[in-house]
Amino acid sequence: MARETLAGRISLLSRTGKILLAGGVALAALAVAVSAVTLYGGDSAATEANASDDADFDPGDFGGAPQRIVPTALPGTSPTASSTSQPVPSPSRSGATRKPATPNAPARPSYSAWAGPGCTGGGLYRETGRFSDGFDGWYTVNIGGHKGDGCDGRFSAVPMSGSDTRDSGGRATWSWYVGSGYTTCSVAVVIPEANRDQDVAGDPTTYRVLADPDDEDSAIKSFEIDQMSLRGSGLIVEKIPVTNQRLAVQLVDRGKDWGSDERDGAHHAAAQMRAVCRA
């Protein structure tokens, strides 16, 4: 019935009205088609664009200097809270007075002292078998070692024995009287810088730990340091035994000073050392 009524009304329209009505229907159909493309075809187009961008992505586009990340706390320690992040204590409901914390016992004092050529106070330094013969003997280099803490920066160049396995009597000995309460200490060994590579040329330099600084036969441990690769820096040697409240390290002169232009006239460098002991 509704369909016949609509058809009858259309038949009563003039020719111009019928043309306008047909045009409106066509426009409506076109609008529906465009909406369908927007809803379904639009997502597909966006997906293709993103895929293209990802294919051209270069991590270097986010370049810049690497940033150092500082840990909030070292292992075994707890981070220190800032003044803005400290929690505010809530009032006690019971009104009881909190017992004050027991203060920690004061830390036992530690021992720290420098020794070496040009150092005064603290540890002791002694040379054995020194002789003068220009660049073939012992000589002093006035700069390049540790300057400060009572030391003036000089160091001694120690001629080598000529053998990797045998010594010829040249010695440099550092010693400290550290007192009671210490079983081991660490020693920081300064490897100086020099204008002549031959002045700091241990490859390696051999050091002995002595139970008695006055007894060259009392060595209980030894270690080696490649001075050539550590010029102008240093190395910390841990857990050096303390004997009778004393600590002693001795450099011996074994080493080759021949065989190539680099080795001809090579010397060991005897500079400063710092002993640190903690109970």
Image (cartoon, grey):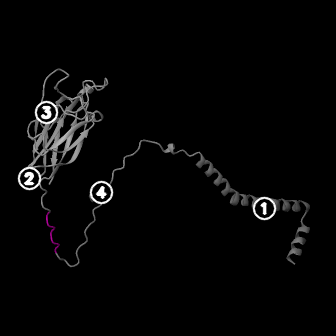
Q: Which residue type does callout 3 highlight? A: Pro
The residue beneath circle 3 is: 117
SS at mark 2 in the image: loop
Q: Nearer the viewer, mark 1 or mark 2?
A: 2
Give whichever of discs 1 and 2 has the lower sequence position.
Answer: 1
Camera-nearest residue between 67 and 145? 145
Residue 210 placed where, x, y %? 14, 43
Are the residues flagged by discs 4 and 3 in contact, CB closer than 8 Å?
no
Q: State the SS at label 1.
A: helix
Compare residues 84 and 180 and report the one nearer the observer.
Answer: 180
* Residue 268 inside the magenta-drawn segment: no
- Cα separation, mark 4 vs mark 1, equals 72 Å
- Dot 3: few (<14), some (14–19), or many (≥20) neighbours within 10 Å? many
Quarter of the image that includes the C terminus: bottom left
Looking at the rendered structure, the kind of residue marked 2 is Ser
Where on the picture, by quarter, is residue 24? Answer: bottom right
Tag 1 residue: 28
Residue 34 versus residue 234 in the image, above or below:
below
Indicate which disc, 4 or 1, sits on the residue closer to the N terminus. Answer: 1
**Which of the numbered marks, if any, corresponds to residue 228?**
none
